[in-house]
Image (cartoon, rainbow, N blue to C red):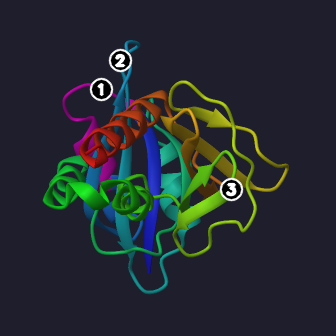
Amino acid sequence: MPFLLRVELPDVPGSLGRLASAIGEAGGDIEAIEIVEKRHDGVAVDDVLLETAPGAMPDSIVSACNALEGVEVVWIGRYAAGGNLFLDLEAVEELTADPAEALDRVVHLLPVVFRADWAVRIHRVTGPGTRTANAPDALPFTEIERARYLELSDDDNLYAGARIDGNEIVVIGRRGGPEFLESELARLGHLVGLATSLARP
């Protein structure tokens, strides 16, 4: 079963190797690793896509990682998309392949790029438009100038949004976590901004 593990670890040589060894010894098989953020305090945040061996428990993998000095598991959850991590450059290639459809296409790419559960375009007047499966039926338009966290309800969804223009935004959501990092918000803003530029006649 595929899981996504978000982990903080020291940004020094050997840290990733120790982490990989701990995951392997606990019954996890690493499929892919993506560096999500490198902080000024010497901490890196990585997303690890892994498969568990029969009988291996995610809790054991978390415990093995947390036992390493300077390592902390921020979040672990099932990763329904499975298979691979979709990099930003691949999203850019898809957006530039058909510029006229870039704004609708970016909605469908964002959940994969950011390992979110859904995405939706919201217009100031007409409300939700293009959306992925599982997107909420009713979300409000929110005035935003740049990509940022959004507090839209008291459920277990975490929301982030990016501005298309003065009348439209894109919102993505994760159920339960992990929280959106500042680096992810910056990337979200860049991708939506690129899609907006491409879609302009």
Instruction: Please give the residue where the numbered disc 1 appears in the rendered image.
Output: 11
Per the model, the C-alpha gap separating discs 3 and 2 is 42 Å
Return the x and y of residue 151 as percentages of the image width and height: 75, 39
Is disc 3 in contact with disc 1, using a CB cutoff of under 8 Å?
no
Q: Is residue 159 magenta?
A: no
Say if 168 sits above or below 38 in the image.
below
Instruction: Please give the residue where the numbered disc 3 appears in the rendered image.
Output: 127
Return the x and y of residue 1 as percentages of the image width and height: 44, 81
Q: Regarding mark 1 in the picture, which secondary structure is present there?
A: loop
Please name the residue shown 45% across and 68% down the image: 3
Q: Regarding mark 2 in the picture, which secondary structure is present there?
A: loop
Is disc 2 in contact with disc 1, using a CB cutoff of under 8 Å?
yes
Which mark is first along the chain, 2 or 3?
Answer: 2
Q: Amino acid at mark 3?
A: Gly
* Disc 3: CA contacts within 10 A as few (<14), some (14-19) or many (>=20): some
Which mark is first along the chain, 1 or 2?
Answer: 1
Q: Amino acid at mark 1?
A: Asp
Q: Tell me the quadrant of the picture where the C terminus can be found.
A: top left
Front-lying residue, 169 or 134: 169
Q: Residue furthest front?
A: 201
Q: Regarding mark 3 in the picture, which secondary structure is present there?
A: strand
Q: Which residues are magenta?
A: 9-21
* 136 relative to 118 in the view: left or right: right
Return the x and y of residue 171 as percentages of the image width and height: 57, 49
Please name the residue shown 32% across and 64% down the image: 24
Per the model, the C-alpha gap separating discs 3 and 1 is 43 Å
Q: Is residue 20 magenta?
A: yes
Q: Amino acid at mark 2?
A: Gly
Please name the residue shown 55% across and 24% down the image: 145
Front-lying residue, 115 or 21: 115
Say if 48 sits above or below 151 in the image.
below
